[in-house]
Image: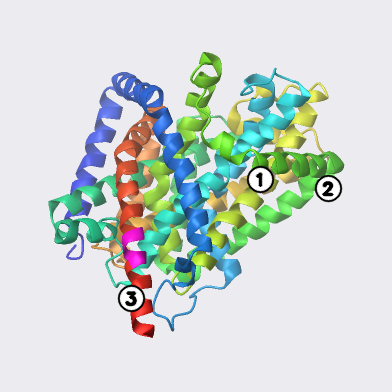
Amino acid sequence: MKKASKVFYITFALVILTVAFGVIAPQSFETATSSIRSFIDTSFGWYYLMVMGIIMILVLIIIVSPYGKIRLGKDADRPEFSTISWISMLFSAGMGIGLVFYGASEPLSHFAIQPATADPGTDEAFKESLQRTYYHWGIHVWTMYGIIALSLAFFQFRKGEPALISSTLKPIFGRKMEGPLGTLVDVLAVFATVFGVATSLGFGAAQINGGLAYLFDVPQESWVQFVIIAVVTVLFIMSAWSGLNKGIKYLSNTNMVLAIILLILVIILGPTLLIMNMFTETFGNYIQNLISLSFQSAPLDAENRSWLNAWTIFYWAWWISWAPFVSMFIARISKGRTIREFLIGVVLTPTIFGAFWFSVFGTTAIDIQKSGVDLTAFPTEQTLFAMFSEMPFGFAMSIFAILLVGTFFITSADSATFVLGMQSTNGSLLPSNQIKILWGIAQSLVAAILLSVGGLTAVQNTIIVAALPFSLVMILMIISLFKALDAEVKLGKTTKK
């Protein structure tokens, strides 16, 4: 493999060692990673809240500043993909499978099991459950992805640098980023991507298995999930092989069509008026309380702090661990857009669509829960199917949901395969199929092996631990970006003179 970089070989070796540890000593692996994660949650929760809150404010500043006029590419460049395809692709890569997996179960959990501050089962808990879910999946996530993707796209397309995380740090460290320091940064990014996507594949396989078990009594066992992963692996490798302009684009567009159809069905067949009223009020409250939510750390309330550690701090670390993959993919498909157009599209569209999705599925699940059917008795991967069984045409919607999980599963994996290929071939925008296939098989094997030993929790812990050092890289990327944007604006003014 002539085109494979040092990053490929180092990360591959680290992945093998980590998986081996998880297989040989699963209990020790989970105990060790849980202890480190618990320490990070308790000691660095304030730090994650500050980082995500400040990033949100910085992105809003960039949108309204003169930087917004700069194009991601040469001044004559125009977007490679239509706006609809672009939004579909960034959304499918970013969190598509998560919306289906958690769409009903997360608001339901915040309402019936463990609300943040309200009493379980109350009207206050109902409203709070949706607001907190929007918070975890909304503006903060997409501003963070947006600013990291902006940094990558700016240096790739405007400055002609390789598509690597390390390339974005050159304004600070110069040519040192072409040596061991740069390799270390890129290895960290690839490592986080491999395990982040492997965990997502594991959850996707578990949900498809859960749906088949609920509908057809298919056993919920490792071998069934292996078969699911194997089938999906073949499909996403075929998609990644065909490239961005064919497989990934067409599948992402298909995803969005399927998601919108399912969304409309649930609105019509569910408590329509309640859904619309709940969305209107809770989304308004979410926007109104955005700043106070952003920096809420509950220093004097042990119970609320415990909830923040389990949910908000977990999510912020989880999304940061996904940033190398999602942001690099978003950057890759965004050449030719202005910074303002790019950030508005990346932040607003998924935030509004995601909030509406959670409102539709969360309100429907909570309404059914309040009617006397205990949906919390089902595991997370079956909550959606249990909800559908209480609705008209529930069986058909469940089949539709399994299909949607499958297509989101494929697009997340083939996007990641594409990005891993870029990161491990010195930033090539068109990585070789051989490298993409190797990474595709590796991701699936990691997911299958860790599912078999019950190691997905430990892997979640591992990438949350990896998110802490990557968050420092992220801060440096943002400083570097502002430095380069400032130079660009000054250069533009000088040229005009």
Q: Residue at x 54, y 55 (%)?
A: 92
Give whichever of 119, 485 is nearer the camera. Answer: 485
Q: Nearer the viewer, residue 272 or 136?
A: 136
**Nearest to viewer (mark 2 / mark 3):** 3
Residue 355: mark in rendering: 1
Spot occupied by residue 64 in the image (x, y as percentages of width and height): 53, 62
In front of the other: 493 or 474 = 493
Question: Within the image, what quadrant is residue 469 found in?
Answer: top left
Q: Amino acid at mark 1?
A: Ala
Q: Main secondary structure of the magenta part?
A: helix
Q: Point out the stretch of residues depicted in magenta.
A: 482-486
Q: Earlier in the sequence, mark 3 or mark 1?
A: 1
Tell whether label 3 touches label 2 (CB within 8 Å): no
Number of other residues with Cα within 10 Å of mark 2, as a class: few under 14, some 14 to 19, many 20 or more:
few
Which quadrant of the rendered structure holds the C terminus?
Answer: bottom left
Q: Quadrant of the N terminus?
A: bottom left
Q: Residue at x 18, y 60 (%)?
A: 174
Residue under label 2, please give it: 268
